[in-house]
């Protein structure tokens, strides 16, 4: 333990963490920069903050205050002690509806304040796109804004009073009329009145520098307002009194389409007289799909409010009539509005990839100009990018003249970094020429502070330095930011990564085969840190269960980044810190779809486990659960399922088996089917044509006998056959022998090559259990054997129907990404369909039976992340199965919930959405759970039987609710 750590532990009641994991997690924010801190402190109160400052002042150690760590200019990083307010100082202290104020601590997440204010018809005005995880302290530090700033201004407009601890231990209550001003500030400001009145550009999004004009007598000498946007360089915020605004009872969203972004930018300022709540702009190259948007090349999202839905709509329609648009759409449905807003909110992540997959980075994320100048500025901005050979996709707060953009800077090579600097210098000049601010929302930080003299001149920047000296004479707080800044091209986070591709197992096709590039995908916008999930979303269940940064997708990506860097995490693939952080990753793949930049932590975890245990002893659970297909086939071949079930029912034997297998002692061992699905299939085919339905003459489909359907839930397979044949389809199973040119379609496995008999029978397998436990060499062997068996199917037009969503997802993604050198893998992936997709595409004229019952349950996390559930929704609707399935993850997640040490997190994940949705369902509700893990979790935690959609439809076909069980 270092002397500093010991000294802090002696005086701080909160957590003091100088360990490798804590330091690695805080080396970066959402910017291009990286600094390694000495340690992290999570203070419990203002006394803890003062104690930390006293120790650090005595030792000359810098202090950086950090909320959620999503700042985009580097100001949430530091080399000294980082204060993390999200753990303890995160409360809503008070809310006064009559006064329309709230008292908040700096670590309070904005959405928690909004939720508390909503029942009173109130809200906090500013709302950055990161509202689900940004903190009030971070918003005050940056003077954040958000999409509603045209109506309700910046955070500074909503601040009333601030409690601050200064670097020398002073406790100040900042407010108007010089309230709380440190000694010397008033004298300094009153000696510079002329400069304060003339030296600041007048525009709504002027965030750069210190807001010293708030100290003018005509502005109320507002010390609290002048503190906003100081980026933790003047004092440490411990509590704030903020103003709330009345929230409109109803809203409408007018989506205005224009030919291009320039036309949209030119139009934005003209809409402000109509009093909109938002005027947001984005272009087509930022939108993955233009479905649901009116035709055009760029759009303005203009939100209106009113006392009634009709009033809000009328205002939106008036704006449409006044706007010169290519096309327009007015949306009043709240769900429809949320879906459209998600496109805009995800832009901070989606903008980090160009349409061709090229990486793009922040750095010039949020310049702002007067709204009337936005069109000309954007044209000049595009010209400047072209001159430097750069590309970017502008979007943002067009009504305020604020533009967000990620640019495809090359920050990995010396020439690329030099171009980054020269472009930055020229762009600063361009912004100033248009009367703008270098920062319009996220602050200057390291990214822009070096260029402030171009905006304010040397004398004003000198005044900033004098003000810093009044507040923090020892330069203790966030040094290198705003005044006396570090160079904008130093300390880049990419400089520590290996220059040559790392030798890995997966192909990482979206990242050019480079694992470092895959890890770089995480830019830190922290959507994975949300404490609740909306709709069908999944990411990140382990973070919501533990609240710990290392169990978020971002935290794990940070640790992998530091593992590759080798400075903080020094033992590479052998790192226990990375292993422990990944241990609670459920491999739900939610981040693959929900993360705006498509981080796939499940793949990274499999890769890490593969490398970590190479040549080493693996945990027992990897053998017990990773090789599950082997054990289950052995039981099937020896016809010992009944014996195994009987032994597992004896408590001492079950406990011993779980202990030997590394399984959670709280778990029940699932019962094995006494007759596998394939055995049922063979006996059924041997008895002649099916007597269960008409002779099928439709398309041929190949039904995949996944491990779970085969050995644990054969009733799902039987039900699927019943429904597929009722829809007129011909069902076959994959071959079990490798044949040269066999027929496919009679449901049998006929050998034309006598030598094939010597190769032995085999079963297809997606390799999922091997992948999830990081046994990638074994997974590859299993997958190649499967491709060998499936070759005759690949030569046909028949789809491969996979009933288990996790296996379908593995075939679609893991197989081609692990066997990236085998073209057959991509061909098989392209054939994979879910049960609902098969019926929709290959039996479009079939009408499912009318079930006419409500449903509850959960969309399988892999289905949400990889497969999509649109076809399932349509099939349920056609069968009159009403209601929505919940999001999140069931928590069992294949091997995860069965492994020792995971039970509590597994249960916490299930308690989030799945179990409440089942408990609250009315009598007669059908509990849908297409995944075996989901059904097992329901059975073991709630005593409820979940069913696959195929089972529900098969029962309806039979008219007997007791048919089709497994």
Image: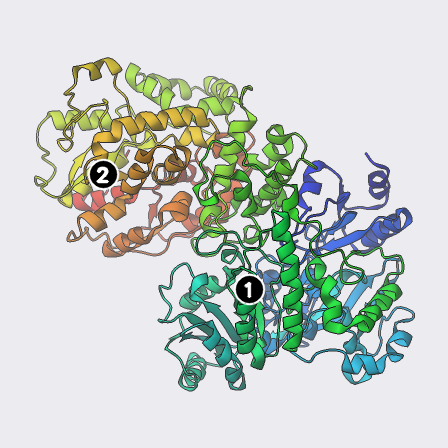
Q: Which mark is residue 158?
A: none
Q: Quadrant of the N terminus?
A: top right
Q: Quadrant of the C terminus?
A: top left
Q: Is residue 466 left or right of residue 958?
A: right
Q: Nearer the viewer, residue 413 or 618?
A: 413
Q: Nearer the viewer, residue 935 or 373?
A: 373
Q: Nearer the viewer, residue 694 or 654?
A: 694
Indicate the quadrant where residue 687 lies.
top left
Q: Position of residue 362 (x, y in %)?
A: 60, 58
- The structure's colour scheme is rainbow
Q: Dot 2 corresponds to which residue?
A: 719
Residue at image coords 48%, 80%: 267
Residue at image coords 68%, 41%: 24
Mark 1 surroundings: few (<14), some (14-19) or many (≥20) residues within 10 A: few
Q: Position of residue 182 (x, y in %)?
A: 88, 68
In what element is the residue under mark 1? helix
Q: Is residue 832 left or right of residue 131?
A: left
Residue at image coords 58%, 43%: 557
Does residue 667 sit above or below 56 in this rendering? above
Q: Position of residue 401 (x, y in %)?
A: 58, 75
Q: Which mark is residue 387?
A: 1
Indicate the quadrant where residue 738 lies.
top left
Sequence-first tag of 2 and 1: 1
Label 2, label 1: how far apart the Cα atoms are? 63 Å
Does residue 922 sit above or below 451 in this rendering? above
Residue 242 can be seen, yes or no: yes
Indicate the quadrant where residue 154 lies.
bottom right
Does residue 65 sit above or below 283 in this rendering? above
Circle 2 or circle 1, nearest the eye: 1
In what element is the residue under mark 2? helix
Tag 2 and tag 1, C-beta contact below 8 Å: no
Residue 438 can be seen, yes or no: no
């Amino acid at each position: 333990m270092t002397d500093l750590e010991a000294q802090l532990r002696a005086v701080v009641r909160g957590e003091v963490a100088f360990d490798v994991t804590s330091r690695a997690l805080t080396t970066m924010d959402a910017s291009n920069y990286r600094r390694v801190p000495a340690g992290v402190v999570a203070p419990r109160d203002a006394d803890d903050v003062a104690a930390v400052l006293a120790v650090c002042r005595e030792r000359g150690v810098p202090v950086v205050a950090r909320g959620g760590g999503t700042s985009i200019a580097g100001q949430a990083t530091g080399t000294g002690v980082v204060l993390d307010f999200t753990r303890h100082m995160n409360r809503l202290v008070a809310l006064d509806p009559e006064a329309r104020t709230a008292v908040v601590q700096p670590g309070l997440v904005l959405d928690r304040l909004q939720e508390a204010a909503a029942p009173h018809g109130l809200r906090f005005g500013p709302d950055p796109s990161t509202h689900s995880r940004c903190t009030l302290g971070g918003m005050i530090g940056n003077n954040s804004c958000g999409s509603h700033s045209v109506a309700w201004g910046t955070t500074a407009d909503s601040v009333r009073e601030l409690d601050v601890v200064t670097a020398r231990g002073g406790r100040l209550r900042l407010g108007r009329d010089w309230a709380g001003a440190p000694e010397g500030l008033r004298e300094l400001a009153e000696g510079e009145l002329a400069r304060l009145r003339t030296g600041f550009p007048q525009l709504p999004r002027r965030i750069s520098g210190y807001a010293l004009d708030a100290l003018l007598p005509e502005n109320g000498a507002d010390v609290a307002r002048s503190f906003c946007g100081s980026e933790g360089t003047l004092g440490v915020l411990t509590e704030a009194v903020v103003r709330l605004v009345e929230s409109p009872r109803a809203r409408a969203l007018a989506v205005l389409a224009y030919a291009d972004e320039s036309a949209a930018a030119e139009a934005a300022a003209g809409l402000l007289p109509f009093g909109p709540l938002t005027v947001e702009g984005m272009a087509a190259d930022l939108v993955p799909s233009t479905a649901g948007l009116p035709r055009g090349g760029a759009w303005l999202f203009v939100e209106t409010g009113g006392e009634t839905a009709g009033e809000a709509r009328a205002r939106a329609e008036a704006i449409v009539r006044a706007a010169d648009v290519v096309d327009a759409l007015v949306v009043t449905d709240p769900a429809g509005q949320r879906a459209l807003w998600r496109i805009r909110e995800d832009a901070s992540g989606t903008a980090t990839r160009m349409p061709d997959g090229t990486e793009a980075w922040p750095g010039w994320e949020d310049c702002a100009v007067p709204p009337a100048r936005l069109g000309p500025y954007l044209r000049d901005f595009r010209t400047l990018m072209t001159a430097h050979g750069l590309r970017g996709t502008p979007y943002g707060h067009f009504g305020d003249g604020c533009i967000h953009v990620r640019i495809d800077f090359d920050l990995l090579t010396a020439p690329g970094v030099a171009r980054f600097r020269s472009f930055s210098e020229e762009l600063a000049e361009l912004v100033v020429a248009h009367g703008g601010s270098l920062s319009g929302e996220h602050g200057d930080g390291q990214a822009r502070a070096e260029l402030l003299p171009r905006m304010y001149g040397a004398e004003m920047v000198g005044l900033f330095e004098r003000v810093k000296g009044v507040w923090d004479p020892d330069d203790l707080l966030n040094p290198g930011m705003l005044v006396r800044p570090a160079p904008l091209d130093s300390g880049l986070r990419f400089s520590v990564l290996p220059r040559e591709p790392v030798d890995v197992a997966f192909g990482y096709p979206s990242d050019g085969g480079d694992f470092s590039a895959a890890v770089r995908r995480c830019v830190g916008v922290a959507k994975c840190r949300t404490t609740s999930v909306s709709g069908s979303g999944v990411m990140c269940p382990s973070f919501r269960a533990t609240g710990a940064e290392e169990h978020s997708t971002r935290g794990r990506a940070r640790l992998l980044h530091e593992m590759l860097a080798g400075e903080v995490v020094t033992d590479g693939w052998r790192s226990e810190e990375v292993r422990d952080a990944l241990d609670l990753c459920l491999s739900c793949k939610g981040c693959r779809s929900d993360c705006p930049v498509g981080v796939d932590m499940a793949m990274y975890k499999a890769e890490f486990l593969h490398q970590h245990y190479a040549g080493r002893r693996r945990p027992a659970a990897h053998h017990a659960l990773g090789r599950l297909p082997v054990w289950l086939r052995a039981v099937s071949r020896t016809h010992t399922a009944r014996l195994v079930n009987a032994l597992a029912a004896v408590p001492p034997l079950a406990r011993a088996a779980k202990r030997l297998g590394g399984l959670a002692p709280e778990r029940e061992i699932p019962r094995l089917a006494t007759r596998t699905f394939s055995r049922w299939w063979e006996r059924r085919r041997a008895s002649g044509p099916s007597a269960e339905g008409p002779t099928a003459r439709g398309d041929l489909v190949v039904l995949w006998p996944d491990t779970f359907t085969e050995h644990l839930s054969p009733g799902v397979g039987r039900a699927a056959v019943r429904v597929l044949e009722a829809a007129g389809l011909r069902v076959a199973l994959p071959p079990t022998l490798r044949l040269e040119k066999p027929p496919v379609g009679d449901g049998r496995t006929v050998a034309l090559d006598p030598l094939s008999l010597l190769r032995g029978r085999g079963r297809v397998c997606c390799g999922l259990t091997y992948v999830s436990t990081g046994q990638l060499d074994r997974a590859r062997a299993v997958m190649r054997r499967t491709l060998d068996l499936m070759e005759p199917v690949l030569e046909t037009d028949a789809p491969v129907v996979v009933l288990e969503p996790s296996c379908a997802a593995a075939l679609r993604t893991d197989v081609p990404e692990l066997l990236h050198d085998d073209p057959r893998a991509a061909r098989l992936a392209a054939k994979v369909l879910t049960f609902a997709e098969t019926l929709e595409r290959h039996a479009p004229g079939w009408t499912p039976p009318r079930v006419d019952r409500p449903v509850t349950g959960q969309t399988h996390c892999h289905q949400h992340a990889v497969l999509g559930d649109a076809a399932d929704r349509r099939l349920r609707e056609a069968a009159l199965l009403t209601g929505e399935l919940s999001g999140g993850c069931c928590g069992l997640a294949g091997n995860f919930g069965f492994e020792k040490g995971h039970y509590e997190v597994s249960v916490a994940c299930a308690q989030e959405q799945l179990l409440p949705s089942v408990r609250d369902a009315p009598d007669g509700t059908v509990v849908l759970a297409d995944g075996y893990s989901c059904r097992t979790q329901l059975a073991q935690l709630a005593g409820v039987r979940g069913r696959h959609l195929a089972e529900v439809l098969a029962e309806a076909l039979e008219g007997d609710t007791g048919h089709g069980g497994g």
